[in-house]
Image (cartoon, grey):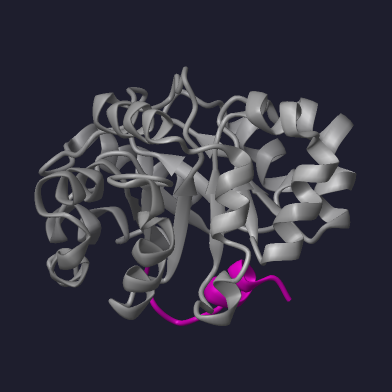
Amino acid sequence: MNRINQKLAEDKKLLSIYFTAGYPSLHDTKKVIQDLEKSGVDMIEIGLPFSDPLADGPTIQESSTAALKNGMTTKLLFEQLKDIRQSVEIPLIIMGYFNPMMQYGVEAFCAKCKEIGIDGLIIPDLPVAEYHEHYQETFEKYGLINVFLITPQTSDERIRFIDNVSNGFIYMVSSASTTGAKNTFGGEQQQYFERIENLGLKNPQIVGFGISNNETFTQATKTTKGAIIGSAFIKHLTHNGVETIGAFVRGIR
């Protein structure tokens, strides 16, 4: 069974952390992953930097720009992660845009992910219909779960199609805006969370965009399986470096 599905089966609310590979420093990638697991994080999203990250807010965009300037590439990321399964057991997901994957070769990319122990991919600019028609067979051949995003504007019909195509969890974007930390969620977001809960989907949902502290984590996970923190963690790395990761995680739950 895929590590993501194993983790989703656990009787707990899950905390997933996103960070940008090669940030703050080029060779911090492996240490960040190891320290996040030691701190009790349930899943990790490894951001593959891209020059035009449309779904990301300014904090993650800036970290991607810095990582690219540091010298991060797809090939280097795979080299950095080649022995990661000797020290890390929790699910690892690569989050990135489709262009670098196409440049690498989609099947070659998937094969490399399987080789080093990546469990899933999140590709915001790969439409679900395109994936289902052209790439699902390849992803499944290499044991990769592809995670799709939904927003408050996504129709029930489309959500049900995504649910049907998915075999892991659904990334539930908390708002229609780009990524970024918030201190609390308003009534509109709470109604959205309840609407999705009432659809009775077969795949659990994990909320992302706007999770930054214990309050937003608790709110987001009231009706869902877990929450993803990205921008707030990137800000923490920017201001405090990689030596205080445990303190950040302890502040969330």
Q: Nearer the viewer, residue 244 or 158?
A: 244
Query: Nearest the camera: 8 or 141?
Result: 141
Q: x, y percentage for residue 81?
A: 57, 61
Q: Residue 113 sits in which quadrant?
A: bottom right
Magenta stretch in the rendered image:
1-14
Residue 226 appears at what percent x and percent y?
39, 61
Q: How many marks?
A: 0
Q: Is residue 41 above or below residue 89?
A: above
Residue depicted at 61% across the width and 55% down the height: 79
Residue 248 lies in quadrant: bottom left
What is the x, y in percent for residue 35?
A: 32, 72
Q: Can residue 11 be seen by looking at this rendering?
A: yes
Please, is residue 52 above or below residue 108 in the view?
A: above
Q: Nearer the viewer, residue 115 or 178?
A: 115
Q: Is residue 40 left or right of residue 225?
A: left
Residue 250 vs 223, above or below: the answer is: below
The quadrant of the rendering that contains the N terminus is: bottom right
Q: Nearer the viewer, residue 71 or 121?
A: 71
- Identify the image quadrant of residue 114: bottom right
Does residue 252 show up? no
